Image: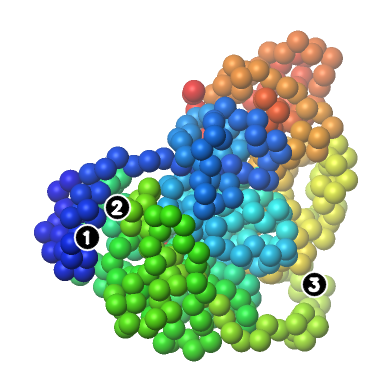
Amino acid sequence: MNLPQDFINKYEKLLGTEAADFLASFDDPTQKGFRINPLKNEPKQLEYSLNQPVAYTKTGYYGSVSGHSLEHQSGYVYSQDLSAMYVAENVTVKPGAKILDLCAAPGGKSTQVASQMNNQGLLVSNEINHGRAKILAQNLERIGAKNTIVLNESPAKLAAAFPGYFDQILVDAPCSGEGMFRKDHQAVAYWSKDYPDQCAKRQREILLSAYQMLAPGGSLLYSTCTFAPEEDEQIAAWLLEEFSTLKIVPIKTYPGMDHGRPEFANGEGTLAGTVRLWPHHFQGDGHFIAKFMDTRQPVAASEQAPKKKTKKKERQKKQPVISREQLELWQNFAAALKPDLRFGRADLRSYGDHLYYYDHSWPDISRLKFMRPGLLLGEFKKKRFEPSYTLALALRPQDYAQTLSVTHAQWAQYVHGDVLQIAQKESKGWALLVCEGKPFAFGKISGGSVKNFFPKGLRFSD
Ligand SMILES: C[S@@+](CC[C@H](N)C(=O)[O-])C[C@H]1O[C@@H](n2cnc3c(N)ncnc32)[C@H](O)[C@@H]1O
């Protein structure tokens, strides 16, 4: 690969005799990886081999998956770079935790965190870029998590809305992307000698906002996919200097992983507790990961300031509640769901004609730009309720009264947008469509055919 001369000079100086191996690694082919999704049942029933587990993640495997496979479409697997999957592995997922992924698109880390949360607590996934936030929402909905909100905000606006709110914050920062050079030749073209410094400036701004949102006693995970010390150890050192309540939490290293290099920053010894995944030592594109713990005393729930009481009318203005008619339409549909999924009025919100599950304990987001204010349950159309694709992906076959098992060939027809012909002439109404045990969409049965409700923008051919 044609690497910029300034890049070569820089790393020859930083790495000495190791530089030749590092620079040569950019010509190596990338090895692929994927994760399975523990939120889905029977993850072992897959077309992909699970014979080669990755030692440093609970759900990672070597191998490649197709974006057009049943497993991928129905959220059982997620394709991810082998070094990227070690980042979210270091987010501590405690039951009921409030977690923020601040720079989340396209969603590799968010889907990993969401799949570990077992639908407990809240994951706020944020992405500043609108187009990328849309992709983030699509990737998260395949995973089938019910406890995720997708926002499209700047870090500063979020910091004003959520002071001291999150127990865990992940900042997978926009960076100079040197780890992407092998995959993305544009990243090489975009690189310049000054680019790491420009990125570091933006990273500091993002982290200032992140710190404001960190609850006392919480933890902050910072990562990049670049090797530039300005964006890695030097940012970690800056965080320690800027915020005296933060301490480094040493990250466990596995074979092939390296410790961070204190000498790349101010020599502060604890920086060795950060991790570098170099492409000449480790399979994958390469990452830097640093974990920080906040040493302020956590505020016990009993000592937290009581929430300001708002009058019912004021609450209704802020949180879009649903009408009596909408509630009835939802209840008619929800009667076919398992009782714990028949969400009541306090946990429902409607935006326009769309109905969402939004747990009443979650914070008010009505003044923020959102892509997915909770789990999209469906849409009100005239005097009907139409269940969403997103809801189907959040269900197990046993969660809905009427399921229809289809063949792999019928699955391919349905995701292509075709109407299915079936033998069960007597069945009718909404059915959860299941292929090889995996729910993948809702369909409406009538007179021996299944009307297609697969989202138009997501249709594909095998
Ligand atoms: C490295 S990518 C995140 C990858 C993601 N965490 C994943 O695992 O799929 C960084 C993201 O930060 C976003 N970003 C760019 N500028 C930003 C800013 N000023 N504040 C917050 N996020 C920003 C980019 O749009 C990009 O999606």
Residue depicted at x 63% and y 51%: 115
Q: Could you tell me how far apart the alpha carbons at marks 3 and 1 are, in whole angstroms? A: 66 Å
Give the amino acid type for the residue marked by disc 2 in the picture. Answer: His
Give the amino acid type for the residue marked by disc 3 in the picture. Answer: Lys
Density class for disc 3 (Cα within 10 Å; few <14, some 14-19, many ≥20) is few
Q: Do residues under tags 3 and 1 come within 8 Å of each other at their CB atoms?
A: no
Name the one closer to the observer, 146 or 52. Answer: 52
Residue depicted at x 66% and y 67%: 98
Residue at mark 3: 313
Location of residue 370 by image quarter: bottom right
Residue at mark 2: 280
Q: Which type of secondary structure does the marked residue at label 3 adopt? A: helix
Residue depicted at x 39% and y 81%: 269
Residue 188 in sight from this viewpoint: no
- In x, y percent, where is residue 96? 73, 65
Q: How many marks?
A: 3
Residue at mark 1: 18
- Which of discs 3 and 1 lies nearer the camera? The answer is 1
Residue depicted at x 76% and y 71%: 315
On screen, residue 452 versus residue 335, left or right, reads left
Q: Do residues under tags 1 and 2 come within 8 Å of each other at their CB atoms?
A: yes
Q: Which type of secondary structure does the marked residue at label 1 adopt? A: helix
Give the amino acid type for the residue marked by disc 1 in the picture. Answer: Glu
